[in-house]
Image (cartoon, rainbow, N blue to C red):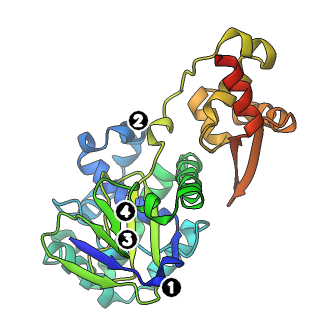
Amino acid sequence: MLRYVLNESDVGAVRFGISPLCELGLSLRAVMVPAGFPLQLPWLRRTEDARADLDLEVLQALIDERLWTPDFLNPRPASPLTRIDDEFAALEALPIEVFLADLLAVHGRIPEPLSGPPRAAFRRVIRALRELWTATFEPYWPRMRTVLEADVVYRGRQIAQNGLSTMLNGISHTVDYADGVVAVRLRDPEDRLQPIDGNGLTLMPTMFTRRASAPVGDGPPMLMYPARGQGALWETEPVANPAALAGILGETRAKLLAALGDPASSTELGVRFGVTTSAVNQHLRALRDAGLLVGTRSGRSVLYLRSELGSALLAGRSA
């Protein structure tokens, strides 16, 4: 059990972040145990051929049988706008002794593929991770990021509407929050009590964890939790669409309006409904101009949400 202790000032320093490098490292869980990540099976199928050409020996050495990854793969993101190039640059500047210590913390030893000269092993790890990113993440990262950003927006709305406690108690079935203590039920049998002490608590949605997880060591306070909406990333989504509403708005716009009870970007919606992003953008602009949607910028994306007027129109549809 890990317990993060928040005082009054710490409560105001809970923030969200997105880390491309962390997603990259955690994706090795799905590669090793595909059955444990059914929502990511489409990604595994699409990248199967590309992964065959990677340095799998080194990549597999970065994760153990408990599906733990070393802390150098779990950087605390500076913001929701973190770029993979910046994270790779920071990783390359990592002291070699930290690289070795993080491997030991996970494996209890240096894995055989990395047991040679430490600096050569470190360079091999960097190269393998860069190739993994280029082959399996770069083509799909815009889609993945929209899901993660939408989760952050949703959690922010929860805080605004119902408070921090409701949000924290809803991010994972293995997280409980009460009386200033965030309790995380980890598979690690060791009990850890870690005061935040003004360092802030970073919450990070990810598509490659089934329960909340945290850094292995006593690094900066951070929780990684399962992002909402992962199932919508790869599959098209049929939405019930009564003829009366479709007759007014058109079939595609009626589907979009019905789906936007939770915020989403045009990229995500295009994937869900099998429509090109440019076409989705045209429909979204028309719905927004009519007052049926509102849009807010989140990083490089605009997230859309049904307005009160749009919800009223839907309610009238079903009356």
Specify whether residue 124 is in view. no
Residue 25, labelled with which disc?
Answer: 4
Near-viewer residue (31 or 281)? 281
Determine the image quadrant of residue 290: top right
Kind of residue at disc 3: Leu
The residue carrying pointer 3 sits among few (fewer than 14), some (14 to 19) or many (20 or more) residues within 10 Å by Cα, namely many
Alpha carbon separation for disc pair 4 and 1: 32 Å
How many callouts does the rendering have? 4
Please give left or right for residue 31 compared with residue 284 in the image.
left
Residue beneath the point at 45% across and 67% down? 203
| Residue identified by numbered label 2 | 42
SS at mark 4 in the image: helix
Kind of residue at disc 4: Gly
Image coordinates of residue 94 in percent, x first then y, are 41, 85
Q: Is residue 170 above or below residue 107?
A: above
Identify the image quadrant of the N terminus: bottom left
| Residue identified by numbered label 3 | 73
Image coordinates of residue 313 in percent, x first then y, are 74, 26
Alpha carbon separation for disc pair 4 and 2: 18 Å
Alpha carbon separation for disc pair 2 and 3: 24 Å
Determine the image quadrant of residue 61: bottom left
Say whether marks 4 and 1 touch (CB < 8 Å). Answer: no
Residue beneath the point at 73% across and 15% down? 246
* Pair 4/1: label in front: 1
Alpha carbon separation for disc pair 3 and 1: 29 Å
Alpha carbon separation for disc pair 4 and 3: 6 Å
Say whether marks 4 and 3 touch (CB < 8 Å). Answer: yes
Along the polypeptide, which appears first: circle 3 or circle 1? Answer: 1
Image coordinates of residue 185 in percent, x first then y, are 23, 64
Say whether marks 1 and 2 touch (CB < 8 Å). Answer: no
